[in-house]
Image: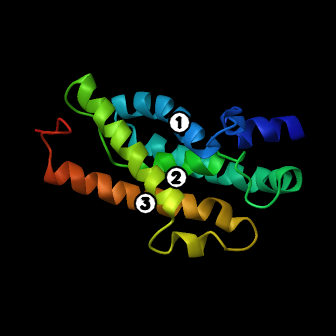
């Protein structure tokens, strides 16, 4: 069972990347998101966000026991936050525009996840495993708001005209 928890919680082992495992995990998540965004399945992004959040609850005890408090190897929380970043964001235009949207969302999410501004750091301290993924969900929400704002302000850059 612990092997399965390691596989799931580390995001198919992407969290075991030696440098910046959260970034590696978030980057890996872009691949399935790209295909989901192609078919504009907003409901599926919500489902993935919820499933990843629930998976965090299932595995966080094992990860803290095995790797310490708020372990970097646990990237399922990054998967949840990275998914939320693209909730209600559709892809339009060319493949180049798709890449711009994905990379912009990725960079915004990593910005909020790493620096933890605007109360994200405070949320990280929630007890009982809540803080492990709640900070990533808040980072994903802030990234979503920024991405949607950028798309609204500069739609031609994102292929939305």
Residue 143 seen: yes
- If the image is split into quadrants, where does the N terminus sit? top right
Q: Could you give the CA–CA distance between mark 2 and mark 3, rounded to whole angstroms?
A: 8 Å
Circle 1: element type = helix
Residue that numbered label 3 is attached to: 141
Q: Is residue 91 left or right of residue 11?
A: left
Pick whichever of labels 3 and 1 is earlier in the sequence. Answer: 1
Circle 1 crowding by C-alpha within 10 Å: few under 14, some 14–19, many from 20: many
Circles 1 and 2 in contact, beta carbons < 8 Å: no
- At a point 70% along the width and 37% down the height, the residue shown is 18
Where residue 104 sits, quadrant-wise, is: top left
Circle 2: element type = helix
Residue that numbered label 2 is attached to: 81
Placement of 153 over or under 43, stated as above or below: below
Residue 1 seen: no
Q: Is residue 15 left or right of residue 137?
A: right
Residue 43 percent coordinates (x, y): 44, 44
- At a point 37% along the width and 34% down the height, the residue shown is 37
Give the residue furthest to the top: 95
Residue 61 percent coordinates (x, y): 83, 57
Residue that numbered label 1 is attached to: 29
Residue 54 percent coordinates (x, y): 67, 53
């Amino acid at each position: 069972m612990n092997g399965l928890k390691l596989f799931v919680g580390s995001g198919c082992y992407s969290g075991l990347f030696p440098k910046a495992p959260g970034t590696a995990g978030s980057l890996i998540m872009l691949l399935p998101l790209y295909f989901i965004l192609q078919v504009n399945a907003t409901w599926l992004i919500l489902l993935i966000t919820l499933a990843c959040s629930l998976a965090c609850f299932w595995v966080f005890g094992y990860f803290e026991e095995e790797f310490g408090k708020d372990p970097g190897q646990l990237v399922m929380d990054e998967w949840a936050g990275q998914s939320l970043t693209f909730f209600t964001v559709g892809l339009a235009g060319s493949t180049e525009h798709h890449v711009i949207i994905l990379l912009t969302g990725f960079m915004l999410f990593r910005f909020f996840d790493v620096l933890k501004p605007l109360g994200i750091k405070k949320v990280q301290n929630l007890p009982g495993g809540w803080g492990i993924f709640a900070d990533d969900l808040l980072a994903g929400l802030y990234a979503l708001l920024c991405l949607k704002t950028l798309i609204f302000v500069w739609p031609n850059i994102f292929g939305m005209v």
